[in-house]
Image (spheres, grey):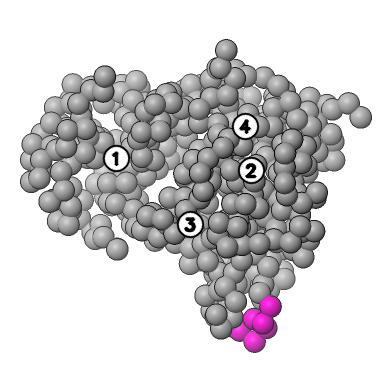
Amino acid sequence: MVLRRHHDMGGLDAGPVDPSGPGAEHDYAPWEKKVDAILRLVSDQKRRIITVDELRRGIEELGPGVYDELSYYERWIASITNLLVEKGVIEIDELGRRMAEITADWPAGGVADAEPKA
Amino acid sequence: MAHDHSHPHPHQPDLEETPLTHYQAMTEAVGQLLIEKGIITGEELRATLESIDSKSPAGGARVVARAWVDPDFKARLLVDVNKAAEELGIDAGIIPIRAVENTAGVHNVIVCTLCSCYPRNLIGLPPDWYKARSYRSRAVREPRAVLAEFGTAIPDDVELRVHDSTADLRYMVLPARPAGSEGLDEAALAELVTRDCMIGVTLPKSPGA
Amino acid sequence: MTARFAIGAKVSVRAAYPPGHVRTPFFVRGKTGVVTEIMGAYRNPEALAYGRDGEPALPLYRVQFQTAELWDDYGGGAADSTVVDIYENWLDPAEA
């Protein structure tokens, strides 16, 4: 029986904190801010489509491997998207088509990280 | 830094030479679909991005500096940060934020071990280290060692109080006013207040430093 | 809102390990602390996380622990403490 879930890490051993490492002062990338903005809008008083607790649950349910592999806002958009599909707000088919179009239109193309992991 | 968010066009000119990742494409697609379905508008998205860009540690620094010069304001701040910030014309959002005060006997540090809760509506988005496994794991078990990594030493006879923001509130530290700052006005005091000292991993800057 | 515990009450955090979304960190489960503040009632995150309405709302407490009681090998000051926000369903009265 698993007692401690992987996101619940208070007290575990880990390496040193890097107060001046990359990301200590940097501005967030535009797409990262867009993820934050989308979450704020779909969870606001007007829409109430997603709660922060659903977002968190979705992130936790990515599982230990993916949780650690993805960056912070990658985890967010993965969870937000799953929730929007579950709730019938967007369809998987239209999402897949749109992602393919956006990647094809992108001047530098897409990276191979869309490949399913073994 | 400051990217231009005045238009919702997805192709940021400075990024077009970098291949798009899977999750960047997902973000773009979700944003477009939500707009096309009328769930959000492009204007709302733009305004929200602008609001995110408008939040920075400077907002928190103004609140702290006012608390240092005005004891009545400080009392109100310790009850309700959002309301007190409003007095300064700062919109700190609807998620309740509480301030915990550093005193001669207590030094406070904020962490979120379960995710990365942070008073972002007052002081902006968190630094990467705040969201990283090393900080989230160790801040509760060996907070003094973590503070040492920031160059901060708290005497052993001072209580180090770590706050794990697990629930519906967000926390910020009200640092103690530094020695030697007696002659400074509010604006100069705000200059001493850094993001990190409002998380509690450092102390405010010393005047003249 | 009727809060079961008063400020100053000694409370134990349930040593429970449900396999889903909860907001009580592992490191305080089974530990004893003192209620320092009652923050009001908030909708239950364990229900909100699964798309339910989270009602009835639960009283939320700030519970203060002696850090040295949380970790066998704690190397910091004797007075150091740790404060965690905990919903009422996770708390039991502690033996005096």
Residue at horizontal 40 percent and vertical 33 percent from the top: A68
Which chain letter goes with mark 3? A
Residue at horizontal 60 percent and vertical 56 percent from the top: B147
Q: Start and end of the magenta stretch?
A: B179-186
Confirm or deny contact between disc 2 and disc 4 (CB under 8 A).
yes
Amino acid type indicated by mark 4: Pro
- What kind of element bears circle 2? loop
Which chain letter goes with mark 4? C
CA gap between label 1 and label 3 equals 37 Å
Observer-nearest residue: B20 or A118?
A118
Residue C12 drawn above or below residue A15: above
Q: Quadrant of residue C18?
A: top right
CA gap between label 2 and label 1 equals 39 Å
- What kind of element bears circle 3? loop
Q: Quadrant of residue B188?
A: bottom right
Q: Are marks 2 and 1 on the same chain?
A: yes
Tell me if C7 is positioned left or right of B89 in this view: right
Amino acid type indicated by mark 2: Val
Which residue is denoted by mark 4 in the rendering? C25
Q: Quadrant of residue B159?
A: bottom right
* Magenta stretch encompasses residue B207: no
Mark nearest the camera among 1 and 3 is 3
Measured as percent of width and height from the top left, residue B42 is found at 24, 46
Which residue is denoted by mark 2 in the rendering? B140
Q: Which mark is residue B40?
A: 1
Structural crowding at the residue carrying mark 1, measured as other residues with C-alpha within 10 Å and reported as few (<14), some (14–19) or many (≥20): some
Which residue is denoted by mark 3 in the rendering? A19
